[in-house]
Image (cartoon, coloured by chain):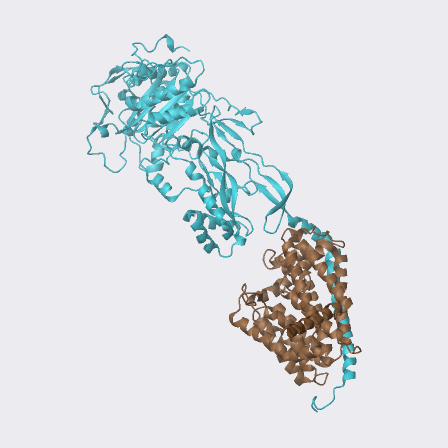
Chain colours: A cyan, B brown
Amino acid sequence: MSPRGTLKDTHGEVTRFGVRALTGFALIVLALTVLAGRFWFLQVMRHDEFSTRSLANSVHLRHLPPPRGLIYDRNGVLLADNVPAFRLDVVPEKIKHMDAMLSRLSEVVPLSDDDVARFKQSLKAHRPFESVPLKFHLSEEEMDRFAVNAWKFPGVDIAPYLTRNYPLGPQFAHVIGYVARIDDKDLGHLDADRYAGTTHIGKTGIEKYYEDRLHGTPGYELVEVNADQRPQRVLERVAPKAGQNLYLSIDARIQKAAIDAFAGRPGAAVAIDPRNGEVLAMVTVPSFDPNLFVNGISQPDYSALLHDPDKPLLNRALRGGYPPGSTVKPFMGLAGLELGFRKPSDTVLSTGTFYIPGQSRGYRDDQRYGAGTVNLVQAITQSVNTYFYSLALQMGMERIDRYLSKFGFGGKTGIDLPAESVGVLPSPEWKRKTWNKPWYAGETVIAGIGQGYWVVTPMQLAYAVAMLADGGVPHVPHLLRATRDGLNAPVVPLAAPPEAPSAIKNPADFEAVREGMIGVVNDPRGTAYQAGIGRGFPYVIAGKTGTAERFSRKGDEYITTTDKAFLAARHRAWFICFTPAEQPRIAVAVVLEAGAWGGTDAAPIARKILDAWLATQANAPRASTLTASAPQDHPVSAEAAE
Amino acid sequence: MNATIASVRMRVLRFGARFLHRPRIDLPLGVALLVLACVGLITLYSASDLDAGVIAGQAARFLLGALLMLAVSRIPPTLLRTWTPWFYAISTFLLVVVAALGEGRGASRWLDLHVVRFQPSEFLKLSMPMMIAWYLHPRQLPPGWKDIFIVGVLIAIPSVLIAKEPDLGTALLVAASGIFVLFLSGIAWWRVGLMLGALAGAAPVAWHFLHDYQRQRVLTFLHPENDPLGNGWHIIQSMIAVGSGGVFGKGWHHGTQSRLEFLPEHTTDFIFAVFSEEFGLIGVLLLLALYVFIVGRCLWIAANARDTYSRLLAGAIGMSFFVYVMVNGGMITGLLPVVGVPLPMISYGGTSAVTLLAGFGVLMSIHAHRKWVS
């Protein structure tokens, strides 16, 4: 029975269709009822839950990074500033082919390999809808070029931000340090909430040491945002609290004068107010421009700094280790007096060579036939080695070590900067620990004149001098002098640390040492007298020269050289001093990495620092310049008084 | 020459006059569609964040669809039936062309004719029920296994082609429109039961042939919370939109979910969520009632159709219309997996509104040629 063979049952078909249509309609109504039920379930039963979620969905917490605190010198000269800049931000979610986009973008805005590498690194730390900075500190030209091509790069935007700027650049690079982009290492120990939205962090110097004070408290905005995290409307705003403004104890004028005094020769100088430990100048020559590091230093720039033979990245003042040479003599002499081995009047005969009893090796004096019979004052004034050879041998290294560590040798001064070097204050124990070798008497002898294993940093020596200048009272050197919470708040001086007792038991001991140091500058036999350091200066200067053997920089490059340039640069030239000698207000330590003698090369630098300091002192007697002044027969005169 | 021009002019004018004065429009269905179009435009205006350009574009599509509907309504069902095999063959052929050289974002659904870009699969939404109705029209109904098998092949060819594009949603809709014809033809219930059982048995096999992203969608549908920022995002955001709307809704253009672009595709596939968020349960129930009315009216027109072809076609178009609503509504409420099915007359863009209105044109024509009128 084929369908074509029979007549269609039209009537039955219509009836059947009617039933089917009704059935279908019933099923449809049933299905739509189920759907309506689902709507009822979502919109009535679970309304509260979804309402809450909808609210949480559209309202996002946006972190507002706080503006970093500014840094000033003691007189309000701006040393670290925030300036508006622009960067390129990328929303990863919106980029389909990241590598292709980056290569196209680099044709518009040059991207360094470093930029790209850092960007890819930070991609991992962000969620896909969070914008990730790609390139910081766009130039005007880069911004213009991007603006024209922006339509080709959806998901890439120019965003404003505040970038750190160091107006005085290299002058303070080794003091203030710099901020740079937060990297993986930082992420490990940072409080994620405090640093949400912050891109930079202090990496070195004051910027690192006072990161907590400078950073501030982030604010937030409750923003209605769309799914692209684009803000639509601000619902609530809690402004970020800017970091503390810091006032350093450094005087930018002294700092500048000190740098200029070096005339580019590698070295370091530290000036401290001995009354309270305030660092007035802290100089490392040569230096570098910290602004280069803020937004990522280019590889060629970094390579140039790294391979510069003068090592501008080395913070000589804080981390440069040099044998102190004769600058330790005042401290050795003081130790001899304080520990009862000598009286100021005791004399030693200097013949030009000193022998350890029973040994044939001689230890030389600077003067060929010796200085004759000298007491402590003359031993310091003329820097007589024999006096200190014999003293050191008498005291023994352990006692020397114990006493000098009171003046900070071999330890951290505690200055408010990171990564301070401790240097080396040699002792038998130190040698055994470090080299696993016994201590020899000869090593004690040369330690007496600051040679051998001794290593000090300019900061350490400046601290020791300052402590000595204040009669042995230790004041931990510090750079931070005052803080200010915003421009409307008062400047709050930092609380002075509790006064520590003097390390000097008998003030008369100090008097003797000081007299010797005054002689260095003002006695015609003094090692710094020829340089005329004290001439024309209204206050009496007490000082000590130091000339330490210098190890050649590259193998034995200098060994065969006999020319004058070599002779003029074969020593570490030191000069330490404080003034006014009676009531010291400034103590200075200067080291020149390559100089002839401490008296002729380092001392004039110290004098220039003192001149600059004098110019900053209100009601101070005027200094006549070093060269213009006539030599004075009796520099220690009435005018030395306050 | 003048006479010829005058004659042509007269014919055109006469056609135009008839077109305007005696439009073959079923008034209840026409009014319902008009209301639906207005609701669609209002919702779209809010969902597009008051983008007049979008509204203009959509209105233009509605206008084009309405004109097409009026034009189709003038074509007698008998003529439509004659053309049906050609229509079916051409649209299936276009699917093959698209499969060979089509373009589109990750899926080759589009045919670019330089003037218009369109998806041939849209044609099938209409040509599929037409073809099945054409095949069953002269047959003895209810159909036997042989006819069911042939109908099955007719359904399968285009459906598989569309599913391969890959566009599973449209493939299912196209297949459903054909199956509805079979259902309305009075196919025996025991056969229905048997086929459903076979289908259930074949499901694991079908799973094997699904694309990864299609499987992912199904898995995501089952466990949306597993991936709140990935595939589950759409479902969760949509459910939040719907649920937060409550009984009365947040008010027109006050839906935060869509306005803030948490909802993906909020002017197209997910516009129902926008509607639910802004007009609440009451709005939803009214809209569903409107849809039920339209489907019911289609079935009523079908029941009164003159011949088998018209009857089956009208009924299938009406029921397909319901499927759109059901699949879309199920998707935005998390009841069904995410498949790209627009909400009829509300979702923005595409050829969807035009083909939909053309389909209603067929219904109008069937209504105009119903059995007790001439």
Relative image position of residue A600 (x, y in whole percent): 28, 22
Q: Residue furthest top?
A: A638
Classify B343 as above or below A417. Answer: below
Relative image position of residue B50 (x, y in whole percent): 66, 52
Relative image position of residue A92 (x, y in whole percent): 52, 52
Quadrant where the N terminus of chain A sits is bottom right
Quadrant where the C terminus of chain A sits is top left
Residue A372: name its quadrant.
top left
Residue at 38%, 24% (x, y): give it.
A257
Relative image position of residue A457 (x, y in whole percent): 37, 30
Residue B223: name its quadrant.
bottom right
Classify A509 as above or below B109. Answer: above
Q: Nearer the viewer, residue A541 or B339?
A: B339
Q: Is residue A47 left or right of residue A602?
A: right
Classify B61 as above or below A494. Answer: below
Classify A7 as above or below A33. Answer: below
Q: Is residue B242 visible?
A: no
Q: Nearer the viewer, residue B322 or A375?
A: B322
Q: Residue furthest right?
A: B372
